[in-house]
Image (cartoon, coloured by chain):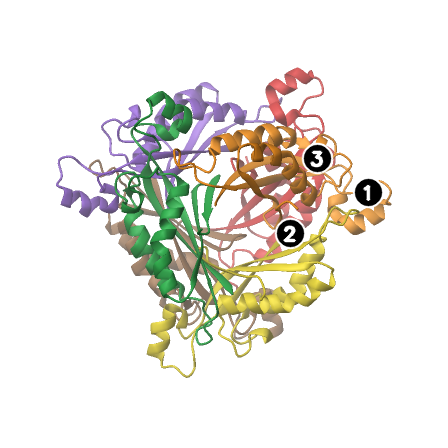
Chain colours: A red, B orange, C purple, D brown, E yellow, F green
Amino acid sequence: MIYVTRRERFSAAHRLFRDEWTDDKNLEIFDKCSYPNWHGHNYVMYVTVKGDLNPETGFVVNIKRLSKIIKEKIIVKLDHRNLNIDVDFLKGKMASTENLAIGIWEELEPTITALGIHLHCVKIEETENNFVEYFGN
Amino acid sequence: MIYVTRRERFSAAHRLFRDEWTDDKNLEIFDKCSYPNWHGHNYVMYVTVKGDLNPETGFVVNIKRLSKIIKEKIIVKLDHRNLNIDVDFLKGKMASTENLAIGIWEELEPTITALGIHLHCVKIEETENNFVEYFGN
Amino acid sequence: MIYVTRRERFSAAHRLFRDEWTDDKNLEIFDKCSYPNWHGHNYVMYVTVKGDLNPETGFVVNIKRLSKIIKEKIIVKLDHRNLNIDVDFLKGKMASTENLAIGIWEELEPTITALGIHLHCVKIEETENNFVEYFGN
Amino acid sequence: MIYVTRRERFSAAHRLFRDEWTDDKNLEIFDKCSYPNWHGHNYVMYVTVKGDLNPETGFVVNIKRLSKIIKEKIIVKLDHRNLNIDVDFLKGKMASTENLAIGIWEELEPTITALGIHLHCVKIEETENNFVEYFGN
Amino acid sequence: MIYVTRRERFSAAHRLFRDEWTDDKNLEIFDKCSYPNWHGHNYVMYVTVKGDLNPETGFVVNIKRLSKIIKEKIIVKLDHRNLNIDVDFLKGKMASTENLAIGIWEELEPTITALGIHLHCVKIEETENNFVEYFGN
Amino acid sequence: MIYVTRRERFSAAHRLFRDEWTDDKNLEIFDKCSYPNWHGHNYVMYVTVKGDLNPETGFVVNIKRLSKIIKEKIIVKLDHRNLNIDVDFLKGKMASTENLAIGIWEELEPTITALGIHLHCVKIEETENNFVEYFGN
């Protein structure tokens, strides 16, 4: 088993709030993240897969192919988008980094598995100080 | 003359577009940056001041004071805000990194000058690949 | 289970030596780290917690609350301090990065557990080339 | 159990291709990595060991000793070298990051074990976007 | 005048040596950089341009256009190439970082000038510890 | 004229305070930096020199020689030392980053000039948020 990680980036807007809560309660719980006119981040995403070595290529996976999958399945949906409005797999969910990591895992997992390897981890950095990792359930 | 730099960060949403242009023209010029529902960045700002050494403190400027000025004059207006909607000093201007750097310079310059030192440069990183520097005019 | 990490920083002085050893032996074992007048580092700390998603907030933990706990329990004791002299939870211990990671774990663990989540890892970077991780015992 | 990591760097040339494949097939599979006149990288290597604390030193391992072992066993063979031509432990293998991580593990493991501690992970970053981790088998 | 910088990356092989010198003299002057079978680097390039603000776009230059120019004029010639063998604008020159920066400046300058702006600086990082800047002559 | 920069690092302890001031005044002016038992930093230093290209080597300066000079003149005096106690060129001066940059400039300048090139800048990063640049007077 070897672990291979690809880093990709996307810039998106989002906001944390619950409609059924007052502005004051949203501010109390979500602080600045609840400000009404959106804010955004340069998200950094690390997708880690694991598998055995292909003896012909010396690869677990051709990382250009992995990058292409991530771009086609994820980046195109998230980059320069609004996570609350534009993203099908986040519909009805809080646009937290946790839900983002889970959503990306679920979008990627079938395609990664179809390559004969395993998705191991989706890691999302929201800022240089905050990040989330999801290893599936 | 010694140069002292303070790094601060803010996360904001923005969008690049001109109302009087068609969506197609906006997309042609501004590409993904014109997407309608906003996107955002973790902006990194470097404020450089220059001046002579205060022999008592060994400082050009007390960097905690410089940081406090930047936070009170700039960060509070930009962090978790929408650059197109929420920021007084960007009203009526394209929310480009260039205009952001110029606007921050103009906000900070009088207060820095009042300290008896000089504002030298405002540098804004929008992503790890793009940044802008303004040295005044 | 989702993993959430908060990064915090502190600057501290320390020195590695054993009183009962000669200066020569301390130098042989600890090299420059045994120099008599202290040296110091910009330590970078990563605190990783794990838990289930709170469906209301989309959070494992409110990261502002996690940051506040780390600041109140750890940073205030370590930042701009001398690890050999000033830190209660390092008294009588070698001020190594290993002991620092273990000590921080023990300081944080009860408070993190009381939040209904689990402390997963304390990682301390002493320099850009050396770091230590502790996952409890 | 505590985990200690040392970061080291080396700059090397390499090329990905199979002699028995046509240039076109090599280009199809390995893309730019198959270009004939070599290319190269600033590889970053993280060697993680784990073990119990030595109560006298507060160390799992003297990290200067660990660094010396990595330099003598690995860096001297790889730094400013051609991975396809110059490296004994890669002879007959594709010069992929995966094989590099496995080869370095096998070179280091006996010496690390002889110290009474365990090799936990060899991580190799080929670029800022691609990295590989090997934990043994 | 505002300064705008675009960061791009390329991975290349090279070697420093003079044919008319003995191997010993090459080793004495160029040390490991003279090793016969090439080595390589992940070069990081920063291209800084300066100019006035276009009031319609808020840009000095459309950074996507700048990036496209750099990719078409420079990256395609350098990425995954051998600096000593493959690069027309380095023919007959030592493949040093200094000559690389000068060569890139000369390749880019006419195209940048034709945009109505000015090339200000080409900065090349060879490793995290060594970099070169050229501002024209 | 080409500019070449070498990055070096050192870890040191220091404290900011004036003997003739009360503890309260020191705390008011220097805040945590005045704490009595020292603290410390991983300082990062960038030494930039400028000069013409040597046509035989393609170098402004052999960067290994520049690194050796910095290590012998500066690092050996500062690394794992106490800036207030151990450093001859800081004696009688406040151990601020500003004075550190000026002191390093004065230590390096004659040796750099003797190489037939010019010292251009000494930059010192005290933390990831604070840095100082000195260009001589």
Discs 1, 3: same chain: yes
Discs 3, 2: same chain: no
* Residue E79 showing in the rendered view: yes
Amino acid marked by disc 3: Leu
> Measuring 44% from the left and 65% from the top, which residue is drawn there?
D12
Per the model, the C-alpha gap separating discs 1 and 3 is: 15 Å
Q: Which residue is mark 1?
A: B18
User: Between residues D92 and F107, which one lies in front from this camera angle?
Assistant: F107
Q: Which residue is mark 3?
A: B83
Percent position of residue F61, x then y: 42, 66
Residue E4 image label? 2
Q: Chain of mark 2?
A: E
> Measuring 55% from the left and 36% from the top, which residue is drawn there?
B8
Q: Quadrant of residue B105?
A: top right
Amino acid marked by disc 1: Arg
Q: Which quarter of the image is occupied by the N terminus of chain D?
A: top left
Q: Is residue F25 placed above or below A137 in the rendered structure?
A: above
Q: Is residue B117 placed above or below C117 in the rendered structure?
A: below
> Measuring 53% from the left and 32% from the top, which residue is drawn there?
B115
